[in-house]
Amino acid sequence: MREGYLQRENEAAVNALVFRPASACLGCRPPSLPPTEIHVWGILMQPDDTVATFLSCLSDDETQRASRLISAARRLEFLAARSALRFILAGYTGQPAKDLQFHLNEWGKPFLKPEEAGLIRFNMSHSHGRALIAVSRGREVGVDLETARPRLNIMQLAERFLGREDLACLHAADPAHLPALFRRLWVVREAVAKAHGTGLRFPLHEEHVELAAAASEGRVTREGKPGDTWARFIPMEGEWVGAVAAKGSDWRVVLCP
């Protein structure tokens, strides 16, 4: 079921993304995925009584990674996130969740081999008990998710990592809107970098984020050259900010399920 989508010219979406428990993704049937769409799933990684279900679909490597996490809450969040990813990708690929094999590119971004996944591409981001999973067909994709951090010194962090254009944007902002604006600038950077397959590469001073006038999307400009990868904001409730990125502008976001 499609609950809404973002198009490039939209100023805002009517519906916010609904976050579902990871266990609810078991046996999911995603909508059809044309090359012009990117599907975004919201996952709650809160522990529940389905740990056995999670373990049943994970690889030995994943269960070993989970066992090395000291915090029980972090361990269960990891199991939930990885299981949700497997459940969702199984729905798109037609493969059993446990049989999916993840590989890493040279920068550590996971992918499925074409013979296993066809043209399916994906990316995942998680923060404070929630996760975003983006799925596309034949188009590299990146996604990022952030929420408010009351103790974070925003300007100190910005002055350390960001360039003068981003700093000017932050200094000009209404103080009440500063935290949300910083999160928007950051998730655009992260989502674009993950779509490129590299993740953030420091230092960041030679680039800045250019937000569209309607504030529905943004892109990274480096040394005065605007990038061709757009990040579009995902409508979310409360203090959450998320974005999904891919090359070009001929695609839209579909919120699932």
Image (spheres, helix red, strand yellow):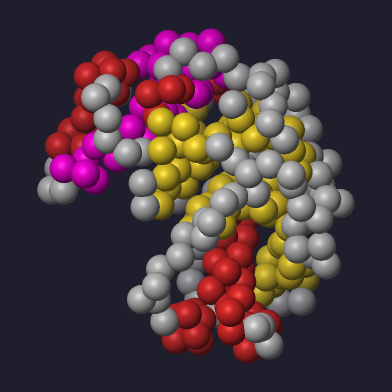
Residue at image position (71%, 62%) is: 219
Q: Is residue 241 left or right of residue 43?
A: right
Q: Is residue 125 left or right of residue 138?
A: left
Percent from the top left, x then y, of residue 139? 68, 36
The image shows residue 160, relative to residue 21, as above or below, that is: below
Percent from the top left, x then y, of residue 72? 16, 42
Percent from the top left, x then y, of residue 118? 61, 19
* Residue 77 vs residue 210, the one in the foreground: 77
The image shows residue 113, relative to residue 231, as above or below, that is: above
For the record, the magenta segment spans 72-100
Badge count: 0
> Visible in this render: residue 207?
no
Query: Image quarter for residue 23?
Result: top left
Q: Is residue 107 left or right of residue 8?
A: left
The image shows residue 145, relative to residue 223, as above or below, that is: above
Q: Quadrant of the C terminus?
A: top right
> Visible in this render: residue 48?
yes
Residue at image position (51%, 81%) is: 158
> Magenta stretch: dominant SS?
helix
Magenta-colored stretch includes residue 78: yes
Magenta-colored stretch includes residue 165: no
Q: Is residue 257 left or right of residue 154?
A: right
